[in-house]
Image (tube, rainbow, N blue to C red):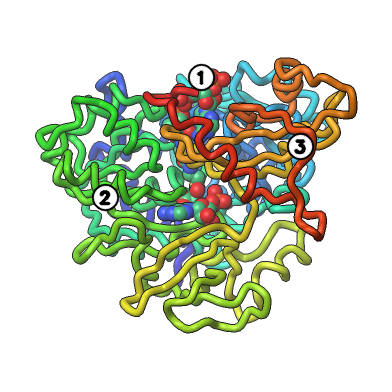
Amino acid sequence: MAMANPLYDALLAPHEGSGRVFLHLPGGGTLSHAAFGRMAARFAHAIRAAGLGPGDRLAVQVDKSPEALAVYAACLRAGVVLLPLNTGYTAAELAYFLADAEPKLVLCDPAAEAALRPVASAQGAALMTLDADGTGSFADAAQGLPERFDTAPRKDGDLAALLYTSGTTGRSKGAMLTQANLLSNARVLVEAWAFTPRDLLLHALPIFHTHGLFVASNTALLAGAEMIFLPRFDVDAVVKALPRATAMMGVPTFYTRLLDDARLTPELAAGMRLFVSGSAPLLAETHRRFEARTGHIILERYGMTETNMNTSNPYAGARRPGTVGLPLPGVELKVTDPETGAELPRGEIGMIEVRGPNVFAGYWRMPDKTREELREDGFFITGDLGVQGADGYVQIVGRGKDLIISGGFNIYPKEVEEALDTLPGIRESAVIGVPHPDLGEAALAVLVPEPGAEPDLAAAAGALEDNLARFKRPRHYEILPELPRNTMGKVQKAALRERFAGTFAGDGGSGAA
Ligand code: MCA
Ligand code: AMP
Protein backbone atom coordinates (compact mmCIF):
# COMPACT_ATOMS: atom_id res chain seq x y z
CA MET A 1 0.00 0.00 0.00
CA ALA A 2 1.43 3.34 -0.99
CA MET A 3 1.68 5.60 2.01
CA ALA A 4 1.15 9.33 2.03
CA ASN A 5 3.85 10.09 4.57
CA PRO A 6 5.69 6.98 5.74
CA LEU A 7 6.90 8.24 9.13
CA TYR A 8 3.70 10.04 10.03
CA ASP A 9 1.58 7.09 8.95
CA ALA A 10 3.59 4.61 11.00
CA LEU A 11 4.63 6.60 14.08
CA LEU A 12 1.94 9.18 14.67
CA ALA A 13 -1.28 8.49 12.76
CA PRO A 14 -2.10 5.28 14.67
CA HIS A 15 -2.23 7.29 17.91
CA GLU A 16 -4.16 10.34 16.67
CA GLY A 17 -6.99 11.10 19.05
CA SER A 18 -6.06 8.29 21.43
CA GLY A 19 -6.57 9.07 25.10
CA ARG A 20 -3.78 6.65 26.07
CA VAL A 21 -0.82 8.07 27.92
CA PHE A 22 2.21 8.77 25.74
CA LEU A 23 4.54 10.67 28.10
CA HIS A 24 4.97 10.48 31.86
CA LEU A 25 6.43 13.77 33.05
CA PRO A 26 8.76 14.52 35.98
CA GLY A 27 6.17 16.39 38.05
CA GLY A 28 3.88 13.35 38.00
CA GLY A 29 1.71 14.58 35.14
CA THR A 30 1.09 12.78 31.89
CA LEU A 31 0.48 13.74 28.29
CA SER A 32 -1.86 11.67 26.15
CA HIS A 33 -1.27 10.86 22.51
CA ALA A 34 -4.30 12.98 21.66
CA ALA A 35 -2.88 16.02 23.45
CA PHE A 36 0.56 15.46 21.93
CA GLY A 37 -1.03 15.17 18.47
CA ARG A 38 -3.00 18.40 18.92
CA MET A 39 0.16 20.21 19.98
CA ALA A 40 2.05 18.83 16.98
CA ALA A 41 -0.77 19.98 14.67
CA ARG A 42 -0.67 23.52 16.08
CA PHE A 43 3.11 23.55 15.78
CA ALA A 44 2.87 22.34 12.17
CA HIS A 45 0.56 25.26 11.41
CA ALA A 46 3.00 27.66 13.10
CA ILE A 47 5.87 26.26 11.03
CA ARG A 48 3.80 26.71 7.86
CA ALA A 49 2.84 30.23 8.92
CA ALA A 50 6.56 31.03 9.29
CA GLY A 51 6.87 30.25 5.59
CA LEU A 52 8.32 26.74 5.66
CA GLY A 53 7.16 24.14 3.16
CA PRO A 54 8.17 20.54 2.45
CA GLY A 55 11.95 20.17 2.16
CA ASP A 56 12.73 23.41 4.03
CA ARG A 57 14.95 23.12 7.11
CA LEU A 58 14.04 23.99 10.68
CA ALA A 59 17.00 24.30 13.07
CA VAL A 60 16.19 23.56 16.71
CA GLN A 61 18.43 24.18 19.71
CA VAL A 62 16.15 23.89 22.72
CA ASP A 63 16.02 22.06 26.03
CA LYS A 64 14.33 18.70 26.12
CA SER A 65 10.60 18.89 26.76
CA PRO A 66 7.38 17.35 25.41
CA GLU A 67 7.06 20.51 23.28
CA ALA A 68 10.52 19.92 21.81
CA LEU A 69 9.47 16.40 20.85
CA ALA A 70 6.26 17.80 19.36
CA VAL A 71 8.40 20.05 17.13
CA TYR A 72 9.85 16.86 15.64
CA ALA A 73 6.35 15.48 15.10
CA ALA A 74 5.27 18.80 13.59
CA CYS A 75 8.19 18.69 11.14
CA LEU A 76 7.19 15.19 10.07
CA ARG A 77 3.63 16.39 9.46
CA ALA A 78 4.69 19.53 7.58
CA GLY A 79 7.30 17.69 5.53
CA VAL A 80 9.92 20.03 6.98
CA VAL A 81 13.45 18.73 7.53
CA LEU A 82 14.39 18.81 11.23
CA LEU A 83 17.90 19.97 12.10
CA PRO A 84 18.38 19.30 15.84
CA LEU A 85 21.40 20.89 17.52
CA ASN A 86 23.24 20.06 20.74
CA THR A 87 22.18 22.55 23.42
CA GLY A 88 25.86 22.92 24.36
CA TYR A 89 26.87 24.53 21.06
CA THR A 90 27.91 28.17 21.23
CA ALA A 91 26.63 30.89 18.90
CA ALA A 92 29.95 30.66 17.03
CA GLU A 93 29.37 26.96 16.39
CA LEU A 94 25.77 27.59 15.34
CA ALA A 95 26.82 30.14 12.73
CA TYR A 96 28.39 27.35 10.69
CA PHE A 97 25.37 25.05 10.83
CA LEU A 98 22.97 27.82 9.86
CA ALA A 99 25.14 28.97 6.97
CA ASP A 100 25.47 25.41 5.70
CA ALA A 101 21.91 24.17 6.12
CA GLU A 102 20.13 27.46 5.36
CA PRO A 103 17.14 26.85 7.61
CA LYS A 104 14.25 29.28 7.20
CA LEU A 105 13.50 29.15 10.90
CA VAL A 106 15.61 28.69 14.03
CA LEU A 107 14.07 27.73 17.38
CA CYS A 108 16.18 28.44 20.44
CA ASP A 109 16.02 28.82 24.19
CA PRO A 110 14.91 32.33 25.25
CA ALA A 111 18.22 32.66 27.15
CA ALA A 112 20.15 32.23 23.88
CA GLU A 113 17.99 34.60 21.85
CA ALA A 114 20.20 37.69 22.15
CA ALA A 115 23.33 35.80 21.09
CA LEU A 116 21.64 33.94 18.25
CA ARG A 117 19.50 36.67 16.73
CA PRO A 118 22.38 38.26 14.78
CA VAL A 119 23.59 34.81 13.69
CA ALA A 120 20.14 33.87 12.40
CA SER A 121 19.55 37.21 10.67
CA ALA A 122 22.93 36.99 8.97
CA GLN A 123 21.59 33.85 7.32
CA GLY A 124 18.19 35.31 6.58
CA ALA A 125 16.53 32.90 9.00
CA ALA A 126 13.66 33.82 11.30
CA LEU A 127 14.20 33.14 15.01
CA MET A 128 11.62 32.08 17.58
CA THR A 129 11.97 30.78 21.11
CA LEU A 130 10.82 27.70 22.96
CA ASP A 131 11.65 27.35 26.64
CA ALA A 132 12.03 24.13 28.62
CA ASP A 133 8.61 24.81 30.15
CA GLY A 134 7.00 24.99 26.71
CA THR A 135 6.60 28.77 26.62
CA GLY A 136 8.19 31.20 24.19
CA SER A 137 7.44 33.11 21.02
CA PHE A 138 7.03 29.90 19.00
CA ALA A 139 4.48 28.54 21.48
CA ASP A 140 2.74 31.93 21.38
CA ALA A 141 2.60 31.81 17.59
CA ALA A 142 1.06 28.34 17.75
CA GLN A 143 -1.50 29.38 20.35
CA GLY A 144 -5.03 29.13 19.01
CA LEU A 145 -4.03 27.59 15.67
CA PRO A 146 -6.11 24.63 14.44
CA GLU A 147 -5.63 21.28 16.11
CA ARG A 148 -6.00 19.42 12.83
CA PHE A 149 -3.41 19.54 10.10
CA ASP A 150 -3.31 18.10 6.60
CA THR A 151 -0.12 16.07 6.71
CA ALA A 152 2.20 16.74 3.78
CA PRO A 153 2.69 13.77 1.47
CA ARG A 154 6.24 12.45 1.51
CA LYS A 155 8.07 9.69 -0.33
CA ASP A 156 10.48 7.09 1.06
CA GLY A 157 13.49 8.97 -0.27
CA ASP A 158 12.46 12.41 0.98
CA LEU A 159 14.56 13.93 3.74
CA ALA A 160 13.18 13.80 7.27
CA ALA A 161 16.17 15.11 9.19
CA LEU A 162 19.62 16.60 8.82
CA LEU A 163 22.04 15.69 11.63
CA TYR A 164 25.52 17.15 11.71
CA THR A 165 28.51 14.99 12.42
CA SER A 166 32.09 16.19 12.31
CA GLY A 167 34.71 14.77 10.04
CA THR A 168 38.31 13.93 10.82
CA THR A 169 39.32 16.82 8.64
CA GLY A 170 37.54 20.03 7.93
CA ARG A 171 34.01 20.97 8.64
CA SER A 172 30.97 19.23 10.08
CA LYS A 173 28.88 17.34 7.58
CA GLY A 174 25.11 17.20 7.51
CA ALA A 175 23.97 13.59 7.30
CA MET A 176 20.81 13.45 5.18
CA LEU A 177 18.37 10.98 6.72
CA THR A 178 15.36 9.96 4.72
CA GLN A 179 11.90 8.83 5.69
CA ALA A 180 12.83 5.27 4.74
CA ASN A 181 16.13 5.35 6.70
CA LEU A 182 14.37 6.21 9.94
CA LEU A 183 11.32 4.05 9.47
CA SER A 184 13.18 0.93 8.39
CA ASN A 185 15.44 1.16 11.44
CA ALA A 186 12.55 1.77 13.83
CA ARG A 187 10.78 -1.32 12.44
CA VAL A 188 13.87 -3.45 12.86
CA LEU A 189 14.46 -2.27 16.44
CA VAL A 190 10.86 -2.80 17.61
CA GLU A 191 11.14 -6.36 16.38
CA ALA A 192 14.71 -7.01 17.54
CA TRP A 193 14.13 -5.64 21.05
CA ALA A 194 10.55 -6.91 21.36
CA PHE A 195 8.89 -3.56 22.10
CA THR A 196 5.12 -3.68 22.63
CA PRO A 197 2.40 -1.30 23.82
CA ARG A 198 2.95 -2.71 27.31
CA ASP A 199 6.40 -1.11 27.49
CA LEU A 200 7.28 1.95 29.52
CA LEU A 201 10.60 3.29 28.25
CA LEU A 202 12.70 5.36 30.64
CA HIS A 203 13.92 8.19 28.39
CA ALA A 204 16.77 10.24 29.92
CA LEU A 205 18.80 10.89 26.75
CA PRO A 206 18.98 14.21 24.93
CA ILE A 207 16.73 14.40 21.85
CA PHE A 208 19.16 16.22 19.56
CA HIS A 209 21.02 13.04 18.56
CA THR A 210 20.11 9.78 16.87
CA HIS A 211 20.12 7.82 20.13
CA GLY A 212 17.46 9.78 22.04
CA LEU A 213 15.46 11.02 19.06
CA PHE A 214 15.30 8.06 16.70
CA VAL A 215 16.46 4.92 18.51
CA ALA A 216 14.43 5.69 21.62
CA SER A 217 11.50 7.89 20.54
CA ASN A 218 10.76 6.36 17.14
CA THR A 219 10.89 2.86 18.60
CA ALA A 220 8.49 3.79 21.38
CA LEU A 221 6.11 5.52 18.96
CA LEU A 222 6.12 2.67 16.46
CA ALA A 223 5.51 0.09 19.18
CA GLY A 224 2.86 2.21 20.87
CA ALA A 225 4.92 2.17 24.07
CA GLU A 226 4.79 4.86 26.76
CA MET A 227 7.80 6.88 27.85
CA ILE A 228 8.95 8.33 31.16
CA PHE A 229 10.32 11.52 29.65
CA LEU A 230 13.03 12.99 31.87
CA PRO A 231 14.72 16.29 30.92
CA ARG A 232 18.20 14.78 31.38
CA PHE A 233 20.04 11.94 33.05
CA ASP A 234 19.92 12.57 36.76
CA VAL A 235 20.68 9.58 38.98
CA ASP A 236 18.05 10.47 41.58
CA ALA A 237 15.33 10.88 38.97
CA VAL A 238 16.33 7.67 37.21
CA VAL A 239 16.42 5.69 40.46
CA LYS A 240 12.96 7.04 41.26
CA ALA A 241 11.57 6.11 37.83
CA LEU A 242 13.19 2.70 37.38
CA PRO A 243 10.66 0.65 39.39
CA ARG A 244 7.86 1.69 37.01
CA ALA A 245 9.83 1.28 33.77
CA THR A 246 10.26 -1.80 31.60
CA ALA A 247 13.15 -0.61 29.42
CA MET A 248 15.92 1.98 29.32
CA MET A 249 18.36 3.08 26.65
CA GLY A 250 21.56 4.82 27.63
CA VAL A 251 25.19 5.60 27.01
CA PRO A 252 27.76 3.74 29.13
CA THR A 253 28.01 6.69 31.54
CA PHE A 254 24.39 6.03 32.58
CA TYR A 255 25.40 2.54 33.67
CA THR A 256 28.61 3.51 35.47
CA ARG A 257 26.76 6.27 37.33
CA LEU A 258 24.02 3.84 38.36
CA LEU A 259 26.65 1.34 39.51
CA ASP A 260 28.18 4.08 41.67
CA ASP A 261 24.87 4.41 43.48
CA ALA A 262 24.04 2.06 46.34
CA ARG A 263 20.32 2.22 45.47
CA LEU A 264 20.90 0.10 42.36
CA THR A 265 19.68 -3.31 43.48
CA PRO A 266 17.91 -6.29 41.89
CA GLU A 267 14.67 -5.05 43.52
CA LEU A 268 14.98 -1.60 41.96
CA ALA A 269 15.25 -3.16 38.50
CA ALA A 270 12.81 -6.00 39.08
CA GLY A 271 10.22 -4.64 36.64
CA MET A 272 12.75 -4.05 33.88
CA ARG A 273 12.96 -6.35 30.90
CA LEU A 274 15.67 -4.53 28.91
CA PHE A 275 18.69 -2.27 29.38
CA VAL A 276 20.30 -1.11 26.11
CA SER A 277 23.70 0.58 25.81
CA GLY A 278 25.30 2.34 22.87
CA SER A 279 26.95 5.44 21.39
CA ALA A 280 30.28 4.55 22.99
CA PRO A 281 32.03 1.34 24.01
CA LEU A 282 30.65 -0.32 27.12
CA LEU A 283 33.50 -1.81 29.10
CA ALA A 284 33.15 -5.56 29.54
CA GLU A 285 33.79 -4.85 33.21
CA THR A 286 30.73 -2.54 33.42
CA HIS A 287 28.66 -5.20 31.66
CA ARG A 288 29.68 -7.84 34.20
CA ARG A 289 29.31 -5.58 37.23
CA PHE A 290 25.81 -4.60 36.11
CA GLU A 291 24.81 -8.23 35.77
CA ALA A 292 26.29 -9.11 39.14
CA ARG A 293 24.47 -6.21 40.82
CA THR A 294 21.07 -6.43 39.16
CA GLY A 295 20.82 -9.77 37.38
CA HIS A 296 20.27 -7.87 34.12
CA ILE A 297 22.50 -8.42 31.11
CA ILE A 298 22.93 -5.12 29.26
CA LEU A 299 22.20 -5.38 25.55
CA GLU A 300 24.90 -3.48 23.64
CA ARG A 301 24.33 -2.27 20.11
CA TYR A 302 26.30 -0.22 17.59
CA GLY A 303 25.24 2.61 15.34
CA MET A 304 26.11 5.98 13.88
CA THR A 305 24.39 9.17 12.85
CA GLU A 306 24.82 8.24 9.18
CA THR A 307 23.42 4.74 9.52
CA ASN A 308 21.15 4.55 12.54
CA MET A 309 21.65 1.15 14.19
CA ASN A 310 23.81 -1.44 12.47
CA THR A 311 24.35 -4.29 14.91
CA SER A 312 22.84 -5.48 18.14
CA ASN A 313 23.33 -8.20 20.65
CA PRO A 314 20.32 -10.52 20.56
CA TYR A 315 17.27 -10.03 22.77
CA ALA A 316 16.95 -13.78 23.03
CA GLY A 317 20.40 -15.31 22.85
CA ALA A 318 23.87 -14.59 24.13
CA ARG A 319 24.64 -10.94 24.86
CA ARG A 320 28.41 -10.97 24.80
CA PRO A 321 30.33 -8.39 26.81
CA GLY A 322 32.80 -6.46 24.68
CA THR A 323 30.86 -7.14 21.48
CA VAL A 324 28.18 -5.17 19.67
CA GLY A 325 26.41 -8.32 18.53
CA LEU A 326 25.20 -9.30 15.09
CA PRO A 327 24.23 -7.25 12.04
CA LEU A 328 20.55 -6.29 12.36
CA PRO A 329 18.09 -7.75 9.82
CA GLY A 330 18.51 -6.00 6.48
CA VAL A 331 21.96 -4.66 7.35
CA GLU A 332 24.90 -6.10 5.43
CA LEU A 333 28.22 -5.75 7.23
CA LYS A 334 31.70 -6.49 5.98
CA VAL A 335 35.21 -5.89 7.25
CA THR A 336 37.63 -4.56 4.65
CA ASP A 337 41.27 -3.71 4.19
CA PRO A 338 41.40 0.02 5.01
CA GLU A 339 43.93 0.62 2.20
CA THR A 340 42.42 -1.39 -0.65
CA GLY A 341 38.79 -1.78 0.38
CA ALA A 342 39.02 -5.53 -0.32
CA GLU A 343 36.84 -7.69 1.92
CA LEU A 344 38.80 -9.52 4.61
CA PRO A 345 38.08 -13.04 5.85
CA ARG A 346 36.18 -13.46 9.13
CA GLY A 347 38.41 -13.04 12.15
CA GLU A 348 40.60 -10.34 10.64
CA ILE A 349 40.60 -6.77 11.89
CA GLY A 350 39.74 -4.07 9.37
CA MET A 351 37.37 -1.27 8.45
CA ILE A 352 33.69 -1.89 9.15
CA GLU A 353 31.46 -1.13 6.15
CA VAL A 354 27.67 -1.37 6.17
CA ARG A 355 24.89 -1.33 3.60
CA GLY A 356 21.13 -1.36 4.00
CA PRO A 357 17.95 0.68 4.06
CA ASN A 358 19.27 2.35 7.22
CA VAL A 359 22.22 3.96 5.43
CA PHE A 360 21.82 7.70 4.81
CA ALA A 361 21.43 9.45 1.47
CA GLY A 362 24.76 11.32 1.67
CA TYR A 363 26.21 14.49 3.13
CA TRP A 364 24.28 17.69 2.58
CA ARG A 365 25.79 19.63 -0.32
CA MET A 366 29.07 17.70 -0.07
CA PRO A 367 29.18 15.35 -3.06
CA ASP A 368 32.93 14.81 -2.75
CA LYS A 369 32.77 13.85 0.94
CA THR A 370 29.84 11.61 0.14
CA ARG A 371 31.82 9.81 -2.58
CA GLU A 372 34.76 9.32 -0.20
CA GLU A 373 32.71 7.58 2.45
CA LEU A 374 29.68 6.13 0.71
CA ARG A 375 30.64 3.71 -2.04
CA GLU A 376 28.74 3.59 -5.29
CA ASP A 377 27.56 0.08 -4.43
CA GLY A 378 25.90 1.45 -1.27
CA PHE A 379 28.44 0.40 1.36
CA PHE A 380 29.22 3.12 3.90
CA ILE A 381 32.77 3.25 5.28
CA THR A 382 32.14 3.72 9.00
CA GLY A 383 35.62 4.75 10.16
CA ASP A 384 35.34 2.13 12.91
CA LEU A 385 37.84 -0.72 13.05
CA GLY A 386 36.45 -4.08 13.95
CA VAL A 387 36.42 -7.79 13.55
CA GLN A 388 33.60 -10.25 12.94
CA GLY A 389 33.92 -13.68 14.51
CA ALA A 390 33.01 -16.97 12.85
CA ASP A 391 29.74 -16.84 14.82
CA GLY A 392 28.89 -13.43 13.32
CA TYR A 393 29.42 -11.34 16.45
CA VAL A 394 31.12 -8.02 15.78
CA GLN A 395 33.72 -6.46 18.02
CA ILE A 396 34.82 -2.87 17.66
CA VAL A 397 38.52 -2.70 18.33
CA GLY A 398 39.25 0.94 17.61
CA ARG A 399 38.60 3.89 15.41
CA GLY A 400 40.22 4.66 12.12
CA LYS A 401 38.92 8.18 12.60
CA ASP A 402 40.50 10.58 15.06
CA LEU A 403 37.49 10.85 17.32
CA ILE A 404 36.99 11.13 21.08
CA ILE A 405 33.69 9.93 22.55
CA SER A 406 33.05 11.57 25.91
CA GLY A 407 29.91 10.55 27.76
CA GLY A 408 28.41 9.66 24.36
CA PHE A 409 29.19 13.03 22.78
CA ASN A 410 31.69 13.17 19.94
CA ILE A 411 34.70 15.46 20.07
CA TYR A 412 36.83 15.97 16.98
CA PRO A 413 40.38 16.69 18.17
CA LYS A 414 41.18 18.76 15.11
CA GLU A 415 38.46 21.27 15.87
CA VAL A 416 39.80 21.76 19.42
CA GLU A 417 43.42 21.85 18.24
CA GLU A 418 42.59 24.57 15.73
CA ALA A 419 41.07 26.67 18.50
CA LEU A 420 44.08 26.10 20.79
CA ASP A 421 46.63 26.82 18.08
CA THR A 422 45.34 30.37 17.62
CA LEU A 423 46.00 31.25 21.28
CA PRO A 424 48.95 33.51 22.10
CA GLY A 425 52.10 31.72 23.20
CA ILE A 426 50.98 28.36 21.78
CA ARG A 427 52.98 26.94 18.90
CA GLU A 428 50.95 23.79 18.44
CA SER A 429 48.73 21.38 20.28
CA ALA A 430 47.48 17.83 20.27
CA VAL A 431 44.15 16.78 21.73
CA ILE A 432 43.69 13.17 22.75
CA GLY A 433 41.08 11.04 24.46
CA VAL A 434 42.18 9.29 27.63
CA PRO A 435 40.23 6.92 29.87
CA HIS A 436 37.87 8.69 32.28
CA PRO A 437 35.93 6.77 34.94
CA ASP A 438 32.70 8.74 34.43
CA LEU A 439 32.75 9.75 30.76
CA GLY A 440 34.55 6.74 29.30
CA GLU A 441 36.97 9.05 27.55
CA ALA A 442 37.80 12.67 28.28
CA ALA A 443 39.67 15.21 26.20
CA LEU A 444 43.20 16.11 27.27
CA ALA A 445 45.23 18.81 25.50
CA VAL A 446 48.98 18.76 25.10
CA LEU A 447 50.31 22.25 24.45
CA VAL A 448 53.66 23.18 22.96
CA PRO A 449 54.58 26.76 23.87
CA GLU A 450 56.31 29.20 21.53
CA PRO A 451 60.01 29.34 22.43
CA GLY A 452 60.36 31.35 25.63
CA ALA A 453 56.61 31.66 26.17
CA GLU A 454 54.86 30.53 29.36
CA PRO A 455 51.32 29.63 28.35
CA ASP A 456 48.65 30.80 30.75
CA LEU A 457 46.49 27.70 31.10
CA ALA A 458 43.58 29.49 32.71
CA ALA A 459 43.58 32.03 29.90
CA ALA A 460 43.76 29.22 27.34
CA ALA A 461 40.76 27.45 28.85
CA GLY A 462 38.88 30.73 29.11
CA ALA A 463 39.58 31.67 25.51
CA LEU A 464 37.82 28.52 24.29
CA GLU A 465 34.59 29.39 26.05
CA ASP A 466 33.12 31.53 23.31
CA ASN A 467 34.00 29.13 20.54
CA LEU A 468 33.55 25.60 21.77
CA ALA A 469 30.75 23.80 23.53
CA ARG A 470 31.66 22.92 27.11
CA PHE A 471 31.71 19.19 26.43
CA LYS A 472 34.43 19.66 23.78
CA ARG A 473 36.77 21.67 26.01
CA PRO A 474 39.77 19.75 27.37
CA ARG A 475 39.42 18.67 30.97
CA HIS A 476 43.16 18.68 31.53
CA TYR A 477 46.19 20.42 30.01
CA GLU A 478 49.79 19.25 29.74
CA ILE A 479 52.74 21.22 28.48
CA LEU A 480 55.53 19.58 26.47
CA PRO A 481 58.48 21.17 24.68
CA GLU A 482 57.52 19.27 21.52
CA LEU A 483 55.08 16.66 20.24
CA PRO A 484 56.30 13.13 19.54
CA ARG A 485 56.37 12.58 15.77
CA ASN A 486 57.15 9.64 13.55
CA THR A 487 59.64 9.80 10.71
CA MET A 488 56.92 11.08 8.40
CA GLY A 489 56.37 14.03 10.75
CA LYS A 490 52.97 12.78 11.88
CA VAL A 491 52.09 13.40 15.54
CA GLN A 492 52.12 10.10 17.42
CA LYS A 493 48.89 10.35 19.31
CA ALA A 494 49.10 6.75 20.46
CA ALA A 495 52.29 7.58 22.35
CA LEU A 496 50.61 10.58 23.98
CA ARG A 497 47.55 8.53 24.89
CA GLU A 498 49.79 5.95 26.53
CA ARG A 499 51.80 8.54 28.40
CA PHE A 500 48.79 10.33 29.84
CA ALA A 501 46.49 7.31 30.19
CA GLY A 502 46.40 7.55 33.99
CA THR A 503 45.51 11.25 34.20
CA PHE A 504 41.88 10.81 35.26
CA ALA A 505 42.33 7.44 36.96
CA GLY A 506 41.61 8.86 40.39
CA ASP A 507 38.52 10.86 39.39
CA GLY A 508 35.60 8.97 40.80
CA GLY A 509 31.99 9.74 41.33
CA SER A 510 29.22 11.16 39.29
CA GLY A 511 30.05 14.03 37.06
CA ALA A 512 33.52 14.55 38.50
CA ALA A 513 35.39 16.67 35.99
C1 MCA B 1 28.05 17.27 29.94
N1 MCA B 1 29.29 17.77 30.06
C2 MCA B 1 30.14 16.96 29.43
C3 MCA B 1 29.34 15.95 28.86
N2 MCA B 1 28.07 16.16 29.21
N3 MCA B 1 31.47 17.01 29.25
C4 MCA B 1 32.04 16.06 28.52
N4 MCA B 1 31.35 15.05 27.94
C5 MCA B 1 30.00 14.98 28.11
N5 MCA B 1 29.30 14.01 27.55
C6 MCA B 1 29.74 18.94 30.79
C7 MCA B 1 28.63 19.77 31.34
O1 MCA B 1 28.39 20.82 30.43
C8 MCA B 1 29.18 20.24 32.67
O2 MCA B 1 29.97 21.37 32.46
C9 MCA B 1 30.12 19.17 33.10
O3 MCA B 1 30.43 18.44 31.89
C10 MCA B 1 29.59 18.22 34.12
O4 MCA B 1 28.27 17.92 33.79
P1 MCA B 1 27.50 16.69 34.37
O5 MCA B 1 26.42 17.21 35.25
O6 MCA B 1 28.40 15.64 34.89
O7 MCA B 1 26.94 16.17 33.03
P2 MCA B 1 25.52 15.71 32.73
O8 MCA B 1 24.66 16.84 32.41
O9 MCA B 1 25.10 14.77 33.81
O10 MCA B 1 25.76 14.94 31.36
C11 MCA B 1 26.50 13.75 31.28
C12 MCA B 1 25.72 12.76 30.43
C13 MCA B 1 25.32 13.48 29.13
C14 MCA B 1 24.49 12.31 31.17
C15 MCA B 1 26.60 11.57 30.14
O11 MCA B 1 26.47 13.96 28.49
C16 MCA B 1 24.49 12.67 28.22
O12 MCA B 1 23.28 12.57 28.38
N6 MCA B 1 25.12 12.01 27.21
C17 MCA B 1 24.42 11.29 26.21
C18 MCA B 1 24.94 11.67 24.86
C19 MCA B 1 24.14 11.03 23.73
O13 MCA B 1 22.92 10.95 23.74
N7 MCA B 1 24.85 10.56 22.71
C20 MCA B 1 24.23 9.94 21.58
C21 MCA B 1 24.85 10.43 20.32
P3 MCA B 1 30.17 22.45 33.60
O14 MCA B 1 30.76 21.72 34.75
O15 MCA B 1 31.08 23.43 32.98
O16 MCA B 1 28.80 22.96 33.88
S1 MCA B 1 24.11 9.54 18.89
C22 MCA B 1 25.30 8.39 18.61
O17 MCA B 1 26.34 8.45 19.18
C23 MCA B 1 25.10 7.22 17.73
C24 MCA B 1 24.12 7.35 16.64
C25 MCA B 1 24.70 6.05 18.60
O18 MCA B 1 25.25 4.95 18.37
O19 MCA B 1 23.85 6.25 19.48
P1 AMP C 1 28.02 9.59 15.97
O1 AMP C 1 28.96 10.29 15.04
O2 AMP C 1 27.59 10.44 17.10
O3 AMP C 1 26.91 9.00 15.25
O4 AMP C 1 28.87 8.45 16.64
C1 AMP C 1 28.98 7.20 16.04
C2 AMP C 1 30.18 6.48 16.56
O5 AMP C 1 29.98 6.09 17.91
C3 AMP C 1 30.45 5.20 15.84
O6 AMP C 1 31.08 5.39 14.60
C4 AMP C 1 31.30 4.46 16.85
O7 AMP C 1 32.64 4.90 16.77
C5 AMP C 1 30.70 4.90 18.17
N1 AMP C 1 29.81 3.89 18.75
C6 AMP C 1 28.46 3.84 18.74
N2 AMP C 1 28.01 2.75 19.41
C7 AMP C 1 29.11 2.11 19.87
C8 AMP C 1 29.35 0.92 20.64
N3 AMP C 1 28.34 0.20 21.12
N4 AMP C 1 30.62 0.57 20.87
C9 AMP C 1 31.66 1.30 20.43
N5 AMP C 1 31.51 2.43 19.70
C10 AMP C 1 30.26 2.83 19.44
The yes-or-no answer for disc 2 within 8 Å of ligand 2 is no
Question: Which mark's residue is nearer the viewer, 1 or 3?
Answer: 3
What is the CA distance from the residue labelled 1 to the residue labelled 3?
43 Å
Chain-order first, disc 2 or disc 3: 2
Q: Is residue 353 left or right of residue 391?
A: right
Q: Nearer the viewer, mark 1 or mark 2?
A: 2
Query: How many C-alpha atoms fall within 10 Å of the one at disc 3: few (<14), some, or many (≥20)?
Result: many
Q: Is residue 471 above or below residue 5?
A: above
- Residue type at tag 3: Ser
Residue 394, percent from left and from top: 40, 68
Residue at image mark 1: 135
- Disc 1, disc 2: CB below 8 Å? no
Mark sitting earlier along the chain (1/2): 1
Disc 3 designates what residue? 429
Kindly identify the residue that appears in the image at 47 percent across and 35 percent down: 436
* Residue at the spot of label 2: 298
**Most foreground residue, 44 or 455:** 455
Quarter of the image that includes the N terminus? bottom left
- Label 1 lies in ligand 1 vicinity (Cβ under 8 Å): no
Q: Amino acid at mark 2?
A: Ile
